[in-house]
Each structure stands twice: as C-alpha cells, then as structure tokens.
Amino acid sequence: MNANAMKRLAVVSLLGLIASCKQLDNMENMNSKTNELATTSNQISQTSDSIAKQSESILDVSVGLKKNTEDLYHQARSKEAEETRQRARDALKLESSFEEKITRSAIYFKSFEFQLWTNKNASSRDDQEYREELQLEAAEEFFRTVQSFYAEIGDSTDISPASEDTATRALFSLSVTMHETHHAQKELIKKENIEEISMLSMIEDTLKKESQLNDGLISLGDLKPYEIAILENAESARNLLRMRYDILSSMVLAKVSDLGDPTYGTVASTYTQLKLYMMKWNSKFVSLNPAQKAQVDTFLGEALRMKEVLSSLGINSELESKIGKIYRNMQFTKTTTCKNCVNKNDINNQLQSHKAQIEALLTK
C-alpha cells in the first residue's frame, strides 16, 4: 500500500471515530434529558399530591365552616324565638285590652321554633325528626304557660268569656289564636309539599287519637313524643278547644249586638248584658259594611267548625249558658238599611243566611 492510500485510510478512520463520538455524546444528552424529564415528572406528581391534600384540607375547612354557620344559625334562631315568646307572654299578662291580648297571643304562637323549621336534610339538622322535636318542646312549654294562668284563676270550673279577670282573658286569647302560623312556614308550604302545623292542629289531631288509645287500638309506641305530651295535658287541651268555641261565639255577638265592639270586647256594661240576656234584640248584621260582614262570617264559620270538632271528641258543644241565652234572644227583623245590598231580595238573602248560621250554632 502506498503512502497516499494509507493517508486516505487514516483520514476515513478518524472521521468514523469522530462520528461515533458525536453519536455517543447525543445518546448521553438524550439520557440526561430523559433523567431530567423523569425528575420533572416526579416533581409534578409531588406537586399534584400536595395540591390534592391542600384541596382536601380546604374542603374540610369548608365543611367545618358550614357546620359552624349552621350551629350559629340554630342557636340564634332558638334564642330569638324564645326571647320573643317571653316578651309576648309577659305582655299578655299585663295588657288589659282583649284586642291587645289577642295580638300578644298571636305573636307567642308564631314564635315557636317549629314555625321557623326549614325542611332541610339531615346534614342541615332541619329534618322531619327535628321538626317533631321542636313540636315536643312547643307542646310542653305551651301547657306550662296554660297551667300558670289556671293557677292564677284558682277556680277553673267557672270560666266565662264575660269575665274581666286578666288571667281568664289571657286563656281565652290564647285559645282563639292557637291556629296562628308564622309567614315563614306559609312561604315554605307554597314551595314544598309539607303539612302546615299549628298548636291547634297538633291538639285536634292528637285528641282524635285519644279514644283509639283508650280502646287499645293503638299504643303509646304508635304516638309521637309531642302527642304524648299533649295527652298528658288532655283535660287542659279539651278545655282550650271549648274556650275557643265560646270566645268565637262571643266575638260574633260583639259585632252584631251592643255587647261590646270597640276592642273585640266581650264585656259590655252590666245593664247592657242584662238587657240582651232578658229581652229580645235585633241583629245588626245586615247594617254592617262588607268587610265587617266578612269578619262575622269568618268568626261564625270557625265557631261552627269548632262545634263539630267538640262533638266528634265527645265534648259538650252547647254554648255557654249566658252566651246561649243572649243568642236565643236574637231577632232577625227585616230592615231597609243594608250596606252592599243591591235590592230588598239581597237584604232578605243575607239575613236568611245569617239566621241559618246562628240557628246551626244553637243546635244541640
């Protein structure tokens, strides 16, 4: 081999060596990049784990805050409701006007916490079970309040709507407002398919079960705790329904007679009471304006409903003796004076309708 050929071979070999070195360098660089990528992936994975843990921590904090907020809401709701009832109860004892007593009694019933129940699921506490707990608390407190007024009266066998005794009038005002419900419950009922509850509905529904319990058709285990609490005070509950019937009937008289109208009053002068009790008198119904007639119809309608409830429960549904005597002296003389009457036939129709309701009230 000559010298030139050997030089060419040496150059080719050198070039091949250089190319091999470059390939090796590239492979080392690729391996380095791969290692860097793996390191970066691990770092990303660790960061993701950290973010996940932080998210879980934030979620735990959110759940905790939600629970704390709900606890604060329930505490505030209970406290405000209790304080409102206390103020209403205190005012009920002090007010002399029957109209004011009715106002305070209505506030008292509307501020029971079951009236503010929201129908949320168990995680928010306001579930059906909790509603019944609130009903139990309400029933127990209400009958304690009732017993405190009975204690002031002394003789609970002679309770009349004509009484001027403060405690007696407080009981009558409570009896006639037991149906009251808070606007929050009314709004909830519009949105959701739930039953409206009042102290009156609780008492009526529970007393209907008393005969079934006495006959052994159901047991105490079939009753809800608040129903048992009401049956523990069954005599007071029956008396309240009876008082509601009597006071509604008296409130009708207050509108259509001279028995006492200015403040839903049921107490007129002794002379006026005696005159209505001893002599015939004419109902003023047709001379009332439409709003007043509607109010009388409302009172009469509920009085008649209460009469049916009392009869169904085996409770005497005859009107209180003095009230009944005054009603029986009522006359329905035709008059040419009638507000919202189109003609004489309209006058007669209104009078006959009013007379029919009064006669139903007097039916034994």
Image: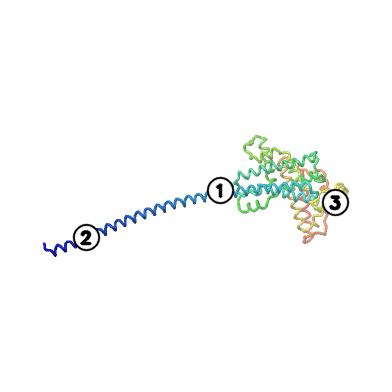
Which kind of residue does numbered mark 1 sit on?
A: Gly
Q: Is residue 57 left or right of residue 106?
A: left
Of badges 2 and 3, nearer the viewer stands: 2
Q: Is residue 55 above or below residue 224?
A: below
Return the residue found at the far front.
3
Point out residue 359 in the picture as x, y percentages from the top left corner.
78, 48
Q: Choose top left, top right, bottom left or bottom right for residue 233.
A: top right
Quadrant location of the C terminus? top right
Q: Is residue 214 above or below residue 346?
A: above
Return the residue found at the far left.
1
Q: Which mark is residue 16?
A: 2
Point out residue 101 in the picture as x, y percentages from the top left corner.
77, 49
Return the residue found at the far right.
271
- Mark 3 sits on what residue? 281
Q: At numbered mark 3, what does the secondary structure look like: helix, strand or loop?
A: strand
- Mark 1 sits on what residue? 64
Q: Is residue 252 left or right of residue 75?
A: right
CB of mark 3 within 8 Å of CB of mark 1?
Answer: no
- N-term mark: 1 or 2: 2
Q: At numbered mark 2, what does the secondary structure look like: helix, strand or loop?
A: helix
Q: At numbered mark 1, what does the secondary structure look like: helix, strand or loop?
A: helix
- N-term mark: 3 or 1: 1
Which kind of residue does numbered mark 3 sit on?
A: Trp
Q: CA distance from mark 1 to mark 2?
A: 71 Å
